[in-house]
Image: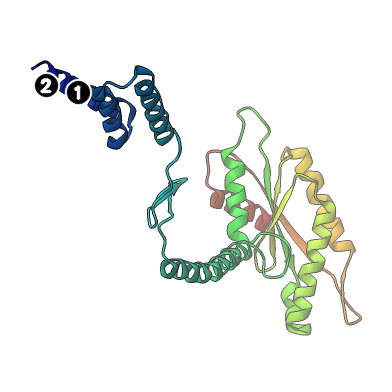
Amino acid sequence: NRAMLENNDHSVRAMTINEGTGMDVGKADKIAAVGQSGREPQRQKDLEEEAQDDGARDGGEEQPRKLGEAFAIDGLLAGGVTPEVQRALDGLSGQIEPLRAELELARGRVTRLQEEANMHPFLPLPNRREFLRELGLVLSHQQPGSVPPALAIVHFSGAEAIRIQAGRAALDGALQHAYSLITVVLGGTDVIGSLGGNDFGIILLAGDPESVTCKRADLTAAIHDQPFVWQGVEYRFNPQIGFAAITGDVMPERVLETADRDLLSK
């Protein structure tokens, strides 16, 4: 009975060593056998330390990944890719790059078309729609108690006669000439745009009555005193100018109508 108890004690001890250190069963059996055979304690201790060292190496070192096992890098699945799958992915990547380039070109075209849609066909200034949008922004940013800006409409009477007598190219040249005359008179903070046809719109941030009177006189003199010359023939414009104060309680179209009525009254 005593021998049986000793055998059971060594078996339990071997199992405890195996579960605590991760050693293989063979080394645990060796330790148990040494204990049963009554060999010297030092030999049994050496076997136990060797088994513990093996268990530590098995638990601390990175085990080699099995073939085909997948792992993740930055949330992307990697590893475990067969050559066939890799070739398919490379093919898809080759197809995506041209599509990405085409998308960038398409975005560039859209941006360019949007810009062109807001500009005059051949003059470097905004068209009517974009000009009224700018006028709306000025209206929405009015400061209480400040001097309101002013809107000016400049009409070039006589431009249609140039069109009839000299053709479309001559009219385009006359409008370019008129645009250059206006920009010379305008200040750095003034905004000019096309209202369509032979009409130009100007937003004057300094819209007090004195400034408006001076601006009207300067525009009239500049346009009248410098005739347009086409193929040796001079064409003199008779500008008509109307003004309206820009206040924050009206729509841009209403300000435009007020300036147009002032133009007709002159």
Crowding near the residue tagged with mark 1, few <14, some 14–19, many ≥20 C-alpha atoms within 10 Å: few
Q: Is residue 40 above or below residue 266?
A: above
How are the colours assigned in the image? rainbow
| Helix, strand or loop at mark 1 | helix
Q: Is residue 156 above or below residue 151?
A: below
Crowding near the residue tagged with mark 2, few <14, some 14–19, many ≥20 C-alpha atoms within 10 Å: few
> Can you see residue 219?
yes
Is residue 54 rendered to the left or right of residue 128?
A: left
Q: Is residue 85 above or below residue 165?
A: above
Circle 2 or circle 1, nearest the eye:
2
Q: Where is residue 147 drawn, in percent x and y?
A: 68, 33
Residue occupying the point 73% across, 62% down: 124
Q: Amino acid at mark 2?
A: Met
The quarter of the rendered structure image containing the N terminus is: top left
Is residue 115 rendered to the left or right of residue 250?
A: right
Residue occupying the point 78% across, 41% down: 211
Q: Where is residue 188 drawn, in percent x and y?
A: 79, 46
Residue nearest the viewer, comparing 260 with 3: 3
Q: Quadrant of residue 58?
A: top left
The residue pinned by badge 1 equals 12
Distance CA(mark 2)–CA(mark 1): 12 Å
Is residue 222 rendered to the left or right of residue 130?
A: right
> Can you see residue 258?
no
The quarter of the rendered structure image containing the C terminus is: bottom right
Q: Amino acid at mark 1?
A: Val
Residue nearest the viewer, comparing 4 with 208: 4
| Helix, strand or loop at mark 2 | helix
Q: Quadrant of residue 3?
A: top left
Name the mark on residue 4.
2
Q: Is residue 198 above or below residue 23?
A: below
Q: Where is residue 185 drawn, in percent x and y?
A: 83, 52
